Amino acid sequence: MSNTVTAWHLIASGDATLFAIVRLSLSVSLAAVAAAVAIGLPLGAILALTRFPGRAAVIVVLNGFMGLPPVVVGLTVYLLLSRSGPLGEFGLLFTPTAMVIAQALLVLPIIAALTRQTVEDLWLEYRDELSAMGVGRASRVMTLLWDSRFSLVTALLAGFGRAAAEVGTVMIVGGNIDGFTRTMTTTIALETSKGNLALAMGLGIILIFLILLVNAAAWGVRLWALERTG
């Protein structure tokens, strides 16, 4: 039986090992995106509506961090969570929590930067109206975030796609421990090196399907939003 046929058989039969890895990957990525959203949405909106010295430099840095090398993020989190690091006493290294933290830091600049751009564009459109109504800063943030919710969904899905496809970061801080911190991407890398191509291909097929599904959802949300506003 070829590796491709075996891979599809593992998927169709609901192989316990394969789907346990998929569940862990999804839970880690979704938790990371949720954490990044909780911080990134208000951060991006506040940055869009606030003027202060050095703002341009902050925006440049934030945009630059969208392309952070994953291994650098992984190394930073590793140093923070290691026994000699400032957060070492919590014992989080080589746990799913460490993976969530690392992925959240990787996704946060994407969410914050795209939110800033989206809210700033919307603020230019509604600035006179909101100012005339005497809307306060906090209310402006909430109003503009709500009004741009469809555009921001695309940013959130982009963040999820980045998190789900990541391997270097989670490998460093998670340790790729079988049955505990082994995700789809780290398993694909490991099993390929071991010659177990069927499992690697099965996970690869599921990962590609998830990424395509995320992009299709982003496209669908965009079209739906254009129809509503058009």
Image (spheres, helix red, strand yellow):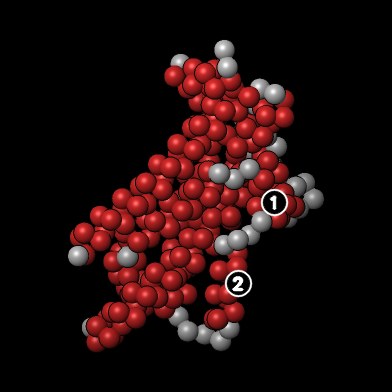
Q: Which numbered dot is residue 61?
A: 2
Q: Residue drawn at (38%, 71%), measured in percent from left and top?
A: 119
Instruction: Using the image, determine if residue 176 lies above or below residue 111.
Output: above
Name the kind of residue labelled 2 in the image.
Val
Position of residue 202 measured from the top left corner of the image (x, y, whole percent): 54, 26
Mark 1 belongs to which amino acid? Val
Residue occupying the point 31% across, 53% down: 221
Res. 90 in view: no
**Which is nearer the N-term, disc 1 or disc 2?**
2
Foreground residue, 17 or 143?
17
Picture quarter with the C terminus: bottom left
Q: Which residue is mark 1?
A: 71
Residue 50, percent across and down? 45, 80
Asked which secondary structure carries label 1, the reply is helix
Determine the residue positioned at 43% across, 54% down: 156
- x, y (%) of residue 25? 53, 37
